[in-house]
Amino acid sequence: MRRKVLMGLAMLAAAAMPLAASAGSGALPASASPAPAPAAATTAQGAPFTLGNVACSLIAVPAAGKLPVGIGTCPGVRPGAVVETKVGLCTLNFLFTAPDGERFIGTAGHCILGGDSELAGDNGGEKTWAKGTGPEAKDSKGHRIGEFAYAVLQDPKDFSLIRLDPGIQASPEMCDFGGPTGINNDISDGPRVLEYWGNGIGIGTAVPARSAIALGFPNADHVYAAGLALPGDSGSAVITEDGRAVGVLVTVGVHGFGIDQNGIDAGTIGITRLAPQLARATQVLGTPLTLVMAGGK
């Protein structure tokens, strides 16, 4: 056990370096020189939060206009695309359907229950909006795509759903990586490589497709991993290398260092797992929601 812990902590320290963020097509070549850290990186931490009863910070949500709106490298309405809310700019995650044909796409709960919104608050609770009454959501060009139907911001959940307007074209496939190919419910030991596409200020246009390392999946509600997240990344879809949906990128800071028989629970970013959040949204909205799958890379 001692050797496993030491190896895990060494991997965590190495992976937490900024260069751990890599393009989906592979790591940066050895000859590539990292750009100086942008000033915006100092604002990566937002409001205080707890994830898995561990103190951390929500990823900050930049105000509209802070990202290169309209020229995003993941255009449209799909996992990895920009979404503009009344709080600011975030990243879309997975696409879902209901039996009546309605479509929903996810982002983080704090993208609508956080920031300067009147709904703001640490562990801001849970809210639903009847059809036609939810806050508006827009794409990277400022065009309406739908309205919020559900949101939760309460440890261990940080998740929201946008009800897409009829006629809005949407794809389930994550930019660059492909997937999702299903939902990852694993409880397991050992390191796992995670993949995500975000729109973080200062890196979203240069290295939007990134990797992180989780030292284990010991918890059914969250995953901690060593990776990089900046303002604008909130809500990003996180998958394993086989394309299965793990959850939603939501927090930054030193998470955990917990250890049990299921693995090491530690990292620099926090991910709320999809399965329990989708189950809760299904219960609250009163309709079954199904993840729309796509092919792998």
Image (spheres, rainbow, N blue to C red):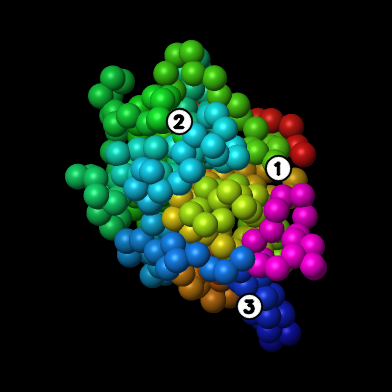
Residue type at mark 3?
Answer: Ala
Residue in the image at 70% along x and 38% along y: 178
3 or 1: tag closer to the N-terminus: 3
Q: Is residue 188 visible?
A: no
The amino acid type found where label 2 is placed reads Lys
Instruction: State the image quarter where residue 11 is shown.
Output: bottom right
Q: Secondary structure at mark 3?
A: helix
| Residue 10 % position (x, y) | 68, 80
Asked if residue 164 lies in the magenta stretch, the reply is: no
Most foreground residue, 201 or 95: 201
Residue furthest bottom in the image:
2
Q: Give the residue number, with chain letter if any, for mark 3.
A: 13
For the point 29% across and 28% down, the residue is 134
Q: Residue furthest right?
A: 30
At horizontal 39% and vertical 37% (from top left) the residue drawn is 84
- Foreground: 34 or 135? 34
Q: CA distance from mark 1 to mark 2?
A: 23 Å
Q: Earlier in the sequence, mark 1 or mark 2?
A: 2
The C terminus, quarter of image: top right
Residue wearing tag 2: 141
Mark identifier at residue 177: 1
Residue 109 drawn at (x, y percent): 38, 45
Please tell me which residue lies in front, 240 or 137.
Answer: 137
